[in-house]
């Protein structure tokens, strides 16, 4: 009979052990769950921190890249401005050079025109070796008549049909005086005109002397259309 039936105390111990196992199992599961939560939370915090660091690094890199790009763009703009300024300086230098050359050309043209005008108003003195002393004179008081094939018209500022004018304030009188000065070699400012009058159509004759000198000269001139008065003969005369 004893072998078939267990005692109450044995059953109680068995039941107690079963409860402890369940309690231990639940406690172990709880501990495991808590550990899992700790692991998850730690991983989240760690990974989140890394992400923040990564984002911060990316932001820093982007900012640095933007600054570098801005610096590069500024440098490019400066270089572009330098090139533009250099090009402008080249253009200004070219324009200045062209303007200088043009001014020099204009100056040369003006000087050439001035020289031509001066030559017309004050022609090169005739060659003395070309002068020819003719025999005798038209009057008894003529000492020596001279003709020179090198004489040329002195030039004129007059236009249109010419009419001789014997007014000392006229252009024609001034140009006749220049022709007489040209033929005799006496400067106009050092020349005394004793007589200047008509000697035929577009022909004139004048008597002059140098100031302070006794020698007098009778000068024959004639008008050449478009070219002015031209000496034809000079006579050295007695007083």
Image: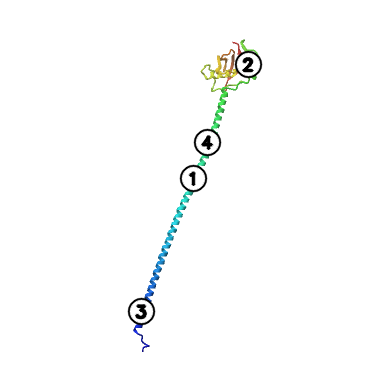
Q: Which residue is mark 2?
A: 146
First along the sequence among labels 2 and 3: 3
The residues tagged by marks 4 and 2 sit, at their Cα atoms, a distance apart of: 56 Å
Say which residue label 3 marks: 16
Q: Are marks 1 and 3 in contact (CB under 8 Å)?
A: no
- Whether tag 1 and tag 4 are in contact, CB under 8 A, the answer is no
Question: In this picture, is 18 found above or below 146?
Answer: below
Q: Residue 238's image quarter?
A: top right
Q: Residues within 10 Å of mark 1 (few under 14, many from 20)?
A: few
Task: Please give the residue where the numbered disc 4 appears in the rendered image.
Answer: 96
- Helix, strand or loop for disc 3: helix
**Residue found at x 54% / y 19%:** 174
In this rendering, the label closer to the viewer, 3 or 4: 3
Q: Residues within 10 Å of mark 4 (few under 14, many from 20)?
A: few
Asked which secondary structure carries label 2, the reply is strand
Mark sitting earlier along the chain (1/3): 3
Give 223 or 91, whichever is nearer the viewer.
91
Q: Is residue 38 visible?
A: yes
Give the label, 4 or 2, closer to the camera.
4
Picture quadrant where residue 231 is located: top right
| Residue at 54 percent of width and 34 percent of height | 100
Mark with earlier residue (3, 4): 3
**Label 1, label 4: how far apart the Cα atoms are:** 26 Å
Question: Between tags 2 and 1, which lies in front?
Answer: 1
Which of marks 2 and 4 precedes in the sequence?
Answer: 4
Residue positioned 40% across, 67% down in the render: 38
């Amino acid at each position: 009979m004893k072998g078939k039936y267990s005692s109450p105390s044995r059953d109680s111990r068995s039941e107690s052990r079963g409860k402890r196992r369940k309690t231990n199992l639940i406690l172990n599961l709880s501990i495991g769950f808590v550990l899992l939560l700790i692991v998850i939370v730690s991983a989240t915090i760690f990974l989140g921190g890394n992400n923040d660091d990564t984002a911060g690094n990316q932001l820093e890199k982007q900012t640095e890249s933007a600054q570098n790009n801005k610096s590069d763009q500024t440098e490019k703009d400066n270089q572009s401005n330098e090139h533009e300024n250099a090009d402008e300086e080249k253009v200004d230098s070219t324009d200045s050079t062209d303007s200088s050359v043009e001014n020099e050309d204009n100056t040369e043209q003006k000087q050439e025109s001035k020289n031509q005008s001066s030559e017309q108003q004050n022609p090169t003195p005739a060659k003395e070796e070309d002068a020819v002393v003719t025999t005798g004179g038209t009057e008894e008081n003529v000492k020596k008549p001279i003709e020179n094939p090198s004489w040329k018209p002195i030039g004129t500022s007059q236009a249109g049909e010419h009419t001789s004018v014997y007014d000392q304030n006229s252009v024609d009188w001034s140009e006749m005086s220049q022709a007489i000065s040209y033929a005799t070699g006496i400067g106009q400012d050092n020349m005394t005109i004793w007589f200047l009058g008509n000697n035929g159509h577009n022909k004139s004759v004048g008597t002059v002397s140098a100031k302070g000198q006794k020698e007098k000269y009778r000068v024959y001139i004639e008008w050449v259309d478009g070219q002015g008065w031209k000496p034809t003969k000079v006579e050295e005369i007695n007083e």
